[in-house]
Amino acid sequence: MATLPNPLPRLATDPSGRSLGLQLPPGRLVDETDDGPWHEPLLWHAEKPSSPGTWKALGAPAARTGLLPVLVDLAGCRAGIEDWELLPGEASYPGDHDVEEVLAEYWRAETDGHVGDETEPFGVEWPGLAPAGVLAADPATRAAQVADAVNRDPGTWAEWIEEPHLALVPARRSSDIPAAIGWTGPLDYEEDVARICAVLRSWEDRFGVRVVALGPDTLVVSVAAPPDSLDDAEVLAAEHYAMCPDTVVRSGPGSVRAYAKELVGATSWSFWWD
């Protein structure tokens, strides 16, 4: 599939971004991967941590140029984002994967033919996709609100994001950002992050999700159309469990049934892969 032109190389000679209609603070173009230099910049990120209002002021105008905003957590990264071991060459195309097939495969692998307390109220059979939610906010507005919440007090998000910096990524959809930069956060669970992005694409369509923040092994998304009933939330919780069991079992309440209660009306979802 044809890719969009990457505007990032223009920032090499115009760091301010004025030629793109932007006013960027000092930042870095990143083309280093775990396999060596990439053939073009993967992302730009600001040198200083972001603050409330940064997403709206810089991210929204950048999106009109084909550069989508995301907060990247650089806490403890001596070499910057290169410490994340980016592997864009290992990612396939998210549109090549069927979300039902991906999630059903994850579910079968986790249940392994056995019913347990973790997957209640469901058994070994994949329960299918949750119905779409009803938009309670504009997805772009909700993303800015969640980004501001992360920026306002990173301490309250310390389990997920500690030192957010605004980054700009050339991508068609917010849900494709992890694959576009070769993010390896779920590497021990899924080697091809594009399959995770296929799930994010489906959530983008059904729940108005936007990728707001990434850490070395964490993901935060905004949600503009959350489930408004527990029944729908339980099916969605099964999707979350299939994609990221640790979020439900280790950092969450321990079961799909209990976790579902946290999803009703939630404006953001967070994921962590051990």
Image (cartoon, rainbow, N blue to C red):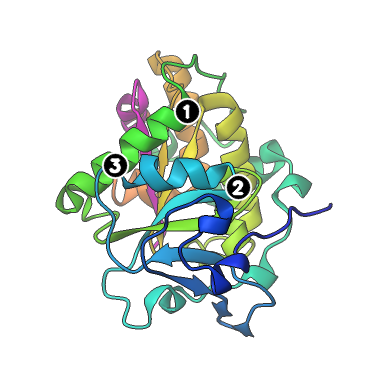
Can residue 268 be seen?
Answer: yes
Q: Residue at x 62, y 34 (%)?
A: 202
Q: CA distance from mark 1 to mark 3?
A: 16 Å
Q: Residue at x 38, y 52 (%)?
A: 246
Q: Position of residue 51 (x, y in %)?
A: 25, 50
Q: Residues within 10 Å of mark 1 (few under 14, many from 20)?
A: some
Residue type at tag 2: Thr
Q: Position of residue 54 (x, y in %)?
A: 32, 47
Image mark for residue 65: 2
Residue type at tag 3: Gly
- The front one of 72 and 269 is 72
Q: CA distance from mark 1 to mark 2?
A: 18 Å
Extent of the magenta region: 258-274
> Considering only order in the chain, which callout, 3 or 1, is on the residue closer to the N terminus?
3
Question: To which quarter of the image does residue 258 belong?
Answer: top left
Image: 144 above or below 47: above
Image mark for residue 139: 1
